[in-house]
Image: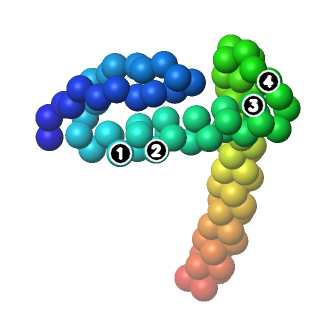
Amino acid sequence: MGELSIKIRIAEREYPMRVKEEEEERLRVVGKLLNERLRFFKDQFGIQDKQDLLAMVAFETMVEKLKMEEEKSAHLAKVGQQLNVLDDLLSSTNK
């Protein structure tokens, strides 16, 4: 698959980029989601400054990222514990 030249509009500015064809849809969805969150903060809190809006969206995004990483880590630990229990059960049946 080749590359495409696209423009993504974020906070009323266009950003040209070259992307792999298989990434185009994902990037367009991300652009749409960013603009929705910018609009939310503008409407909800009356923030007009674009830099402040972008900072709020970046902050919110990082909070969500850290939360998901913690949840993933907890999930992997639980899976590891369950695998250890299964391994112990299998080991005990082979004796």
Amino acid type shown at disc 2? Val
User: Which of marks 2 and 3 precedes in the sequence?
Assistant: 2
Question: Which one is closest to the eye, mark 1 or mark 3?
Answer: 3
Residue at 21% x, 31% y is 4
In the rendered view, tell whether residue 22 sits above or below residue 91.
above
Figure quadrant of residue 48: top right
Residue corresponding to mark 2: 29
Rounded to the nearest whole Å, what is the CA distance between mark 1 and mark 3?
26 Å
Amino acid type shown at disc 3? Lys
Q: Residues within 10 Å of mark 1 (few under 14, many from 20)?
A: few
Q: Are marks 4 and 3 in contact (CB under 8 Å)?
A: yes
User: Which of marks 2 and 4 precedes in the sequence?
Assistant: 2
Q: Are marks 3 and 2 in contact (CB under 8 Å)?
A: no
Residue corresponding to mark 4: 47
Rounded to the nearest whole Å, what is the CA distance between mark 3 and mark 2?
20 Å
Residue corresponding to mark 3: 42
Q: Are marks 1 and 2 in contact (CB under 8 Å)?
A: yes
